Amino acid sequence: MDKLNRREFLGKAVVATGAVAAGSLSVSNLHQASAAPGVKKPTDKVTLGNSGLKISMVGVGTGSIGSGHQSNQTRLGQEVFTQLMRHAFDNGINFFDLADSYGSHPYFARAMQGVPREQYVIQTKTDHRNPQHAKQDIDRFLNELGTEYIDSLIIHCVTEDDWTTKYRGVMDVFEEARQAGKIRAHGVTCHSFGALKAAAASDWVQINQVRWNSKASHMDADVETARALFAQMRQKGQGMIGMKVVGEGDLVRGGNAMSPNECYRFQVESGVVDAFVVGVEKIEHVDQLLHGTQFALNEVGYRLAAAL
């Protein structure tokens, strides 16, 4: 998930909002219909490829600087974490990106107490490469999350070019869990271009969460090389979720900084992701994510890979 420098993020958000108020977006733009029917708001539901999962076009991540079973989000403490998740949910976001390594499972379970399970979509991840450990993880995750099923389960941070052979045992465990109803879809987050190419070639991959932004910050290839591969993935029917939307904060700071709104626009108009997630740390970040994505939709509309 994206590592957002909170002060810089909000500063950029203020600038972006000020530009809108000054007239950089016309009234006609504000009411322009999206290119794809039915996707006019950031909380409208999109289908992740052929997985059958329907999620809000923007999702909330819980793994900013996430490792060792903690993250910036969990370090906020349960009360603030709950306020953040519920504010996102109450404003129409139904997709939440978790991971074992973020330590966000118990925090999220407590945050969503009282909310009907079918009203939100959980994605989480395991770092284990051993099939038996991965199988144990699934049962543990279900217990930690207080749920009977996980919507999307991901093999986390894969770097090997031959991972679809090397980790076949884990893949089989995921598929068995899907057949048993413990998970609804399975996929991968890749952290090398070779691993991405293997994912693109795999019929097992239902969900790809990919590092994707306009300056190739913390990505696995240059923008155009990645774009071409991601388009193939999406056209194949693999669900595509963008991450590293602000490049762990690199894109929104420095002399050539972009505004968060520009980062969101890139995701919307790129045509190669169905949805994207941002690791937000304040309620204001959620509001800006929704506001900025709405302006992007009004300006350029939701793009489809087939239109490239």
Image: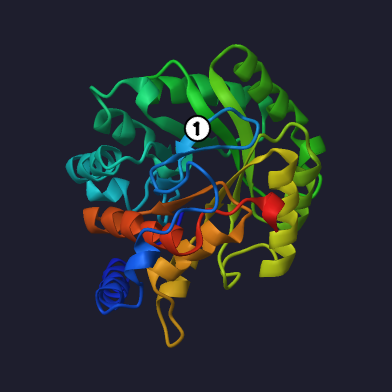
Residue lying at the far bottom in this picture: please name it. Answer: 255
Residue depicted at x 56% and y 31%: 153
Q: Amino acid at mark 1?
A: Lys
Residue 237 drawn at (x, y percent): 70, 38
Pointer 1 residue:
54
Tell me, what colour scheme is on the image? rainbow
Residue closest to the eye, 231 or 126: 231
Q: Position of residue 211 (x, y in %)?
A: 58, 57
Q: Is residue 236 left or right of residue 179?
A: right
The residue sitting at 43% across, 76% down in the picture is 258
Q: Is residue 249 visible?
A: yes
Q: Pointer 1: residues within 10 angstroms few (<14), some, or many (20+)?
A: some
Residue farthest toward the top in the current orientation of the protein: 180
Residue in view at x 53 percent, y 26 percent: 137
Q: Residue farthest to the left? A: 79
The number of numbered discs placed on residues in the rendered structure image is 1
Front one among 54 and 98: 54
Residue 281 shows in this picture: no
The one of 140 and 282 positioned closer to us in this rendering: 282
Q: Is residue 233 above or below residue 298?
A: above
- Please indicate whether residue 221 sits to the left or right of residue 13 in the image: right
- Residue 173: x and y in percent read 67, 22
Q: Is residue 20 above or below residue 176?
A: below
Label 1 residue SS: strand
| Residue 15 placement (x, y as % from top left) | 29, 77
**288 versus 98 height, above or below:** below
Quarter assignment of residue 74: top left
Vertical order, 218 against 128 (above or below): below
> Which residue is at the front of the view, 144 or 123?
123
- The C terminus appears in which quarter of the rendering? bottom right
